[in-house]
Amino acid sequence: METLYTFLLLAVGSALPYLAASPKASLLYPYGKDQGDSVNPKADDGNSPEIFIKTSFSFYGKKYDSLFANNNGVVSFGKNVSQYTPDPFPLDDAVPFVAPYWADVDNDIAGDIFWRQTQDPGLLSQFTADISRYFPVISFTPIWMFIATWEQVAYFGSASDKVNTFQAVLATDGEISFIMLNYADIQWTTGIASEGDPATGLGGIPAQAGFDCGDKKNYYNIPGSRTPEIINIGNTTNVGEPGRWVFQVDLLFIGAPTATSDCLVK
Ligand SMILES: *[C@@H]1O[C@H](CO)[C@@H](O)[C@H](O)[C@H]1NC(C)=O
Ligand SMILES: *[C@@H]1O[C@H](CO)[C@@H](O)[C@H](O)[C@H]1NC(C)=O
């Protein structure tokens, strides 16, 4: 009994600082070095190497076999993205991507970008359970996931200690695919090269969240994108859980009413 008590006290004691550091850590799927994640090099506007994925990922009716975790808050298919100021969707340059929070991250100043592919049965069932809770009519059993996490990342030109923590999870069964965007802690919207204020990380052209299929036509913007309101994304949701946005992105667009037709890219 005494041993159990000691164990419980230790467990609680060590969990508290982590929860305090990241207000909504519970929204995030497990990530980090101890999960076997890779980490992007420290470089302003940098990216991961091209990641060849184990199961092709269907996005707007097209299958992709590689992706990049880009420092500036974007997971792109087939080609990296170094642009730091978000252009409005639909994009002109035709790179298909998912943007959990596209803005001018500088991980040279603070923070890390972690990523991994996983087929861990526990995580796959967690995702299955999440989808069936949010969309009871859909039966989806993923066989592959990609988890990219921006942990306590600073903005370019920062003169503050503000940092953002957010995550993009991609999951597919080989045909149907979903994305889940998780916002644990958002403190800034804009780097100084996007006309942001160095002291606050606000103003200028704020971050954009959503996804664009690369055909110059079809996209989805999370409300508040490229406006000061995006700072509150940790309090917004399309699935009844503040800080979380979930979309089916292969062909059907649940929760994404503006993106109803197939991507025109072939
Ligand atoms: C990524 O983009 C930059 C800038 O456009 C380019 O110089 C670089 O070669 C690209 N890296 C990869 C791995 O594709
Ligand atoms: C959510 O809203 C509450 C109350 O308005 C506020 O205190 C909090 O900072 C907000 N959180 C985020 C992540 O925006």
Image (tube, rainbow, N blue to C red):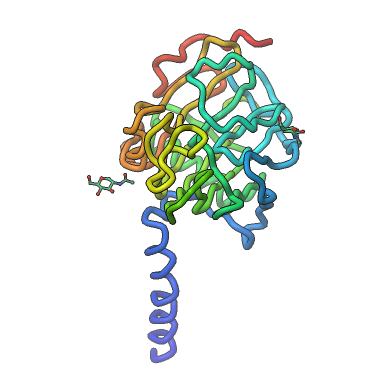
- In the rendered image, the residue lying farthest to the bottom is 2
Residue name at image x 40 percent, y 39 percent: 244
Residue name at image x 39 percent, y 74 percent: 12
Q: Position of residue 33 (x, y in %)?
A: 64, 60
Q: Position of residue 217 (x, y in %)?
A: 53, 9
Q: Depth check: give the residue in front, 8 or 102.
A: 102
Image quarter of the C terminus: top right
Residue name at image x 45 percent, y 33 percent: 195
Query: Image quadrant of residue 173?
Result: top right
On screen, residue 103 versus residue 187, left or right, reads right
Q: Position of residue 14 (x, y in %)?
A: 44, 75
Q: Quadrant of ligand 1?
A: top right
The answer to whether residue 153 is above or below residue 20 is above
On screen, residue 255 versus residue 193, left or right, reads left
Q: Depth check: give the residue in front, 143 or 243.
A: 243
The answer to whether residue 18 is above or below residue 79 is below
Residue name at image x 63 percent, y 47 percent: 115
Q: Position of residue 57 (x, y in %)?
A: 65, 28
Image quarter of the N terminus: bottom left
The answer to whether residue 15 is above or below residue 92 is below
Q: What is the tally of numbered marks visible in this picture?
A: 0
Query: Image quadrant of residue 188?
Result: top left
